[in-house]
Image (spheres, helix red, strand yellow):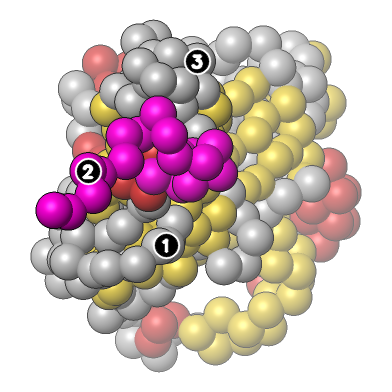
Amino acid sequence: MSRPGRSAARLPAALLAAALLAPLTACSPGTTGSTDTADTTGTSGTTAAAQASPGAEDRPVTVAVTPTGKQVPAGEPVRVTATGGTLTSVTVTAADGRTLPGKVAADGRTWTSDRKAVPGAAYTVKTATRSAGGTAGSSTAAFTTAPAGKVNKVDWRPGGATTVGIAQPISLVFDHPVRNRAEVEKQLKVTTSNDTEGSWGWLRDWSGRDRVDWRPRTYWKPGTQVTLDAELNGTDSGADGGWFVRDYRTAFTVGAGQIVKVDLDRHRLSLVRDGKTLRHIPVSGGTPGGDKRSWRGTAVLMAKEGTINMNSETVGLGNAYDKMVDHSMRLTWSGMYAHAAPWNARFFGRSNQSSGCIGMSDADAAWFYAQVRPGDPFEITGKDTKGVVAPGNGFGAWNLSWAEWQEKSALR
């Protein structure tokens, strides 16, 4: 006759505790043994039970993390879901030490990262939980993302820690096409010291590349401080564009309220600062009646380039000129400048006889060059011109109405 089995009540206390805890060990699907790290191939969620010592009526919290596995596609937020309890904290850390910020939902059961998982990264997800019975627990999961097959880079203006004129836009030019324009635009955050109203607009740069500019509704208020945070890392450009693998940031200050008024019919340039005219300068603009005419509308001073070589062949005017030019100030990508032009001295203030640029004497050019800064608007008028400066030919966005410019946003 066999001996009757012992009841649970007669088990030693240590053995009883072990028997209760054994089913609570966290395991990845398809594995055996004790582990608190999930790292399996695939894109479905990984479940890890919180390591805890529940009471008699307490049940363990299970935690699901997505994505999971190795070489998973980038560009998605990280999501953590708790079943049988709530999340008390979630930390997602990349191998380089950077963390993905996120928020726990109001019910405490889900957490979603604010940023997307970036290409070519290894992440560890550490989760703290509390069961329905009040028991604390923790779990850890891990995943890696596939590297970017193609990287999209950005060239931006203006540079950081600069002072610019009141017409300066924020301008980003991309190495490769951007098809997911709305997704990219959502990652571009402009902050100003006085809540300046403005909008992004997509256009084709003079180089043929995709470009997006942010301009205020009207000229900047002098003294405005501006910051751009382009949180692009982990964003897919779309077909043929590749991934962004870094963020960009620039900050600048708006200088004096300075406007350059160019009247080609009167052959005169006027510098106006804070509503006061500082000087009238006699000039000669582009020759009427052909390709040598100047542009009209609002052009923005792009750069002060100093003494440079100007060659007419680079702007499609044959061999008309090839010379070194002083005090050169670029206004368009197509080659219109304001600069010293002593060879045209007899025409200053009298007629337009240049190859499209705004020329003036050496003395006037030296003074004027010292007064202006990139971002200053040149408001150009005249009857016989080539037309209005296009938005992508330098910074010609000011030649569109505010309504027209807003329509160029991908988020409209």
Callout 2 crowding tier (Cα within 10 Å): few <14, some 14–19, many ≥20: few
Residue 35 numbered tag:
1
- 103 to 389, vertically: above or below: above
Whether 4 is among the magenta residues is yes
Q: Amino acid at mark 1?
A: Thr
Q: Amino acid at mark 2?
A: Pro
| Tag 1 and tag 3, C-beta contact below 8 Å | no
**Residue at image point 79% right, 52% down:** 369
Element type at marker 3?
loop
Q: Position of residue 272 (x, y in %)?
A: 73, 24
* Res 214 visible: no
Residue 163 numbered tag:
none
Element type at marker 1?
loop
Looking at the picture, tell me which residue is in the foreground, 62 or 309. 62
**Residue at image point 75% right, 33% down:** 253
The Cα–Cα distance between marks 1 and 2, rounded to whole angstroms, is: 37 Å
Element type at marker 2?
loop
- 90 to 76, vertically: above or below: above
Residue 27 position by quadrant: bottom left
For disc 3, the marked residue is: 134
Residue 4 numbered tag:
2
Task: Give the extent of the magenta segment.
Answer: 1-19
The C terminus is located in which quarter? top left
| Tag 1 and tag 2, C-beta contact below 8 Å | no
Callout 3 crowding tier (Cα within 10 Å): few <14, some 14–19, many ≥20: some
